[in-house]
Image: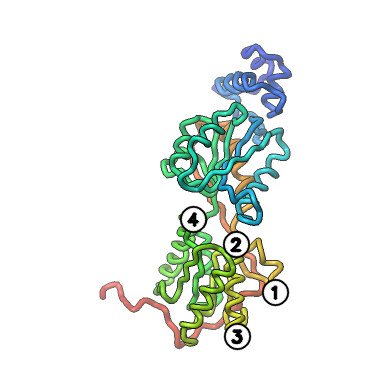
């Protein structure tokens, strides 16, 4: 049976002072690990944790694991901004934030165990780490842990991520709605999250009963840089007959979109008059490029804030069901996509009927 929060009763049961109990339940840093453990155990036993304010973060030390590149804005601005979102969400709490670099795959499990076993590591946020061994260790250490932009395939850890598949589907559907039928997707598939976006793109083609051709409608890059995308786009344009040229390009990131624009301009094509360009990113270069970029903003800063909120819930209700929170993207309409009328001489509908 749930009881009302009674600090005096908790102090009596734990043998601690009322001020100590109050500081623990307020999430203050000037309390010992032993005192925190005793107070929170007594509070959970009495069923009063749900009475606490959701604004409290009942820990003093939080460790963030992420790929090493995430800690440098020049090498991975996306994850760097996620980490900034975590830091911003913690400004109202007395929490010491520490960081540790781990590779996405084949992570250093010994290093992970060493850092997680430290007394000051009371909880962890794991960003973009796909190694299932790390997920297993995190689940078995019984310290609160939330994944960001990755998933525990054995469903033991909560996670928050962009809804990659829906973002891909929504983005290409926007171009379809603007009258574009021949759309080239310029994408990097180095991680399963990007494959999910591409799956969403293909689903949008299928839902419209349009035939998707890897040769005509897909370019795969090894990375997200502008230079590689420009080379790929230039090669594609040189081998593509003008009659089969795409009317729109959907790029997997802002830098890829800039590379595509550069290739189009060098080929004497105008954006958006001749070819429209759209991005699934929308933060890095949208405002400073010569042609403002229409894009779907993939949630970034919000990932950190939502992970902190999810961690709060795990601290208050450690036995609550575990699930995944998928965040939608946001369409930002600028000047790089134009609306066109459908061409009567082009139809991408699959000619194979249901009973053929």
Whether pointer 4 and pointer 2 mark residues with C-beta atoms closer than 8 Å, the reply is no
Gap in angstroms between the C-alphas marked 3 and 2: 26 Å
Question: Percent x, y for residue 327?
Answer: 56, 52
Which residue is pictured at 71% across the width and 35% down the height?
93
- Tell me where residue 178 appears, x and y as whole percent: 56, 75
CA gap between label 2 and label 1 equals 17 Å
- Using the image as rendered, state which of residue 209 and residue 284 is in the foreground: 284
How many residues crowd mark 1 within 10 Å: few (<14), some (14–19), many (20+)? few
CB-based contact (under 8 Å), mark 3 and mark 4? no
Residue designated by label 2:
281
Instruction: Decide which of tag 3 and tag 1 comes sooner along the chain.
Output: 3
Label 4 sits on a secondary structure element that is: helix
Local SS, label 3: loop
Res 33 → quadrant: top right
Disc 3 versus disc 1: distance between alpha carbons?
16 Å
Name the residue beneath numbered marker 4. Answer: 193
Comes first in the chain, label 4 or label 1: 4
* Camera-nearest label, 2 or 1: 1
């Amino acid at each position: 049976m749930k009881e009302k929060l009674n600090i005096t009763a908790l102090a009596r049961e734990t043998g601690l002072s009322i001020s100590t109990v109050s500081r623990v339940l307020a999430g203050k840093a000037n309390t010992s690990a032993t005192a925190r453990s005793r107070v929170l155990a007594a509070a959970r036993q009495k069923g009063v944790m749900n009475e606490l304010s959701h604004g409290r973060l009942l820990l003093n030390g939080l460790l963030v694991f992420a790929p090493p590149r995430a800690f440098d804005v020049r090498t991975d601005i996306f994850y760097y901004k996620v980490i900034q979102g975590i830091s911003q969400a913690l400004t109202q709490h007395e929490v010491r934030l520490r960081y540790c670099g781990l590779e996405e795959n084949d992570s250093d499990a010994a290093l992970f165990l060493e850092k997680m076993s430290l007394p000051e590591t009371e909880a962890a946020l794991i960003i973009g780490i796909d190694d299932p061994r790390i997920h297993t260790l995190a689940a078995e250490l019984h310290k609160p842990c939330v994944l960001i932009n990755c998933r525990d395939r054995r469903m033991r850890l909560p996670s928050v991520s962009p809804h990659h598949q829906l973002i891909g589907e929504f983005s290409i559907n926007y171009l379809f709605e603007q009258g574009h039928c021949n759309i080239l997707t310029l994408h990097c598939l180095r991680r399963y999250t990007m494959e999910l976006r591409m799956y969403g793109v293909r689903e949008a083609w299928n839902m419209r009963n349009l035939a998707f051709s890897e040769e005509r409608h897909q370019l795969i890059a090894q990375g997200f840089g502008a230079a590689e995308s420009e080379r790929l786009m230039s090669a594609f344009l040189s081998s593509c007959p003008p009659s089969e040229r795409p009317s729109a390009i959907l790029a997997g990131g802002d830098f890829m979109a800039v590379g595509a624009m550069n290739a189009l301009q060098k080929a004497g094509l105008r954006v958006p008059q001749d070819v429209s360009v759209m991005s699934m990113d929308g933060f890095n270069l949208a405002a400073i490029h010569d042609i403002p970029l229409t894009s779907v903003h993939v949630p970034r800063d919000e990932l950190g804030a939502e992970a902190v909120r999810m961690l709060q819930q795990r601290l208050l209700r450690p036995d609550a069901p575990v699930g995944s929170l998928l965040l939608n993207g946001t369409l930002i309409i600028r000047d790089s996509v134009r609306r066109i009328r459908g061409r009567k001489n082009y139809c991408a509908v699959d000619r194979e009927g249901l009973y053929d």
